[in-house]
Image (cartoon, rainbow, N blue to C red):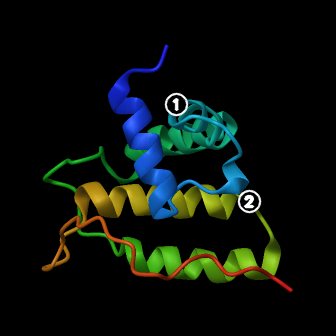
Amino acid sequence: MKRINDLIRERLFLACGIINSRAGDASFEELRCSEWSPQFEDHMRCRLVIGSMRYGRLNDPEKPNYDYVGSIIDRAKMFRKTGNCELLVDIANLALLEFEDGNHPLKHFESSDDGKHVGVKS
């Protein structure tokens, strides 16, 4: 049975256009469970473990200052050329490492909807 705050949240999301017909009648919890790829996560974790042996552990203060963002850009270009999905796993891991270890002078997290969304290919 849904709690009242769950029902209110769903109604607010629906009214704000956050929940739309593409998600059907799925609840937030159902979507939270279904909108993930365990295989992709497994590839990420395996490569992070191997990477820790090669480059240093996550959040290690002694680790060199790597250019994660530059590597993300390079790998995205390579993926466009080759279609090798391993590069997507690398990109995800590099984003995670930048999130955790990055030292951008303006680094912060501010959740927002800037109106920019994934484009549809024609």
Q: Mark 1 points at which residue?
A: 29
Q: Could you say which is closer to the camera, residue 65 or residue 13?
A: 13
Q: Provide residue 83's location: percent of width, then percent of height.
A: 80, 70
Tell me the amino acid under the disc marked 2: Cys
Residue 114 vertical placement versus 24 (above, below): below
Q: Which residue is under mark 2?
A: 85
Q: Is mark 2 on a helix, strand or loop?
A: loop
Give the quarter of the figure containing the C terminus. bottom right
Q: Quadrant of residue 104?
A: bottom left
Q: Where is residue 22 in the image (x, y as percent from the top left)?
A: 72, 55
Of residue 6 and residue 66, the one placed in the foreground of this image is 6
* Residue at (30, 44) in percent of width and height: 57
What percent of the width, then of the height, locates residue 71?
48, 75
Kind of residue indicated by mark 1: Glu
Which secondary structure lies at badge 1? helix
Q: Which residue is drawn at the image coordinates 38% and 38% (left, top)?
A: 8
Q: How many numbered circles does the render carry?
A: 2
Label 2, label 1: how far apart the Cα atoms are: 28 Å
Q: How crowded is the residue under tag 1: few (<14 C-alpha within 10 Å), some, or many (20+)?
A: few
